[in-house]
Amino acid sequence: MRVFTQLAVRLLDAILPEPDEPEHLKTGRRGEELAYFFLRKHGYTIVARNFRTPWHKSELDIIGWNGGILCFIEVKTRTTRDIATAEAAVDDTKRNDLRRVARHYLRQCAENTPTRFDIVTVYLDRPKPEITILKSAFLLSGE
């Protein structure tokens, strides 16, 4: 079934007109798609993608369960390793923004739901993308 879904996504990408958007947004979208399938392959149950609120500038790229833990997942995609690492882009400001959005999401969850923040890095600088999960990259508390 997963192979069928991936083929369907690729087919739709080939058929639908290319959106007129900057290259870095296309790269980010591709990285999020790759991360989505990678996480599912590694046992995550995805419950939301691109979750945002009207009150915060950041969005949670992917939200999913890994075992009994609700994971808020930030995906960082890079086409080169020449500058800083992909995960370095999740600085203190970004982490605090993600925490605020996560707290908003948690209002609909049971109290004391176990959570963590993971970062998925996607490097597209080789023929086969390199994808890594950094589990528990930072905590909900920490502002």
Image (tube, rainbow, N blue to C red):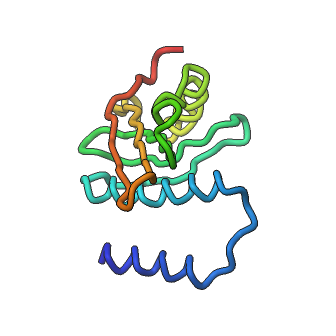
- Residue 140 vertical position relative to residue 117 in the rendered view, above or below: above
Q: Nearer the viewer, residue 133 or 68?
A: 133
Instruction: Measuring from the top left, give residue 40's x and y in whole percent.
Output: 32, 58
Side (left or right) of 104 relative to 88:
right
Instruction: Measuring from the top left, give residue 26's x and y in whole percent.
Output: 62, 59
- Residue 124 vertical position relative to residue 92 in the rendered view, above or below: below
Q: Quadrant of the C terminus?
A: top right
Q: Quadrant of the N terminus?
A: bottom left
Q: Residue 15 falls in which quadrant of the image?
A: bottom right
Q: Nearer the viewer, residue 75 or 85?
A: 85
Residue at the right extreme? 20
- Residue at 53 percent across and 36 percent down: it is 107
- Residue at 48 percent across and 40 percent down: it is 74
Q: Residue 135 falls in which quadrant of the image?
A: top left
Instruction: Measuring from the top left, give residue 140's x and y in whole percent.
Output: 45, 24
- Residue at 31 percent across and 73 percent down: it is 2
Instruction: Measuring from the top left, give residue 126's x and y in whole percent.
Output: 39, 55
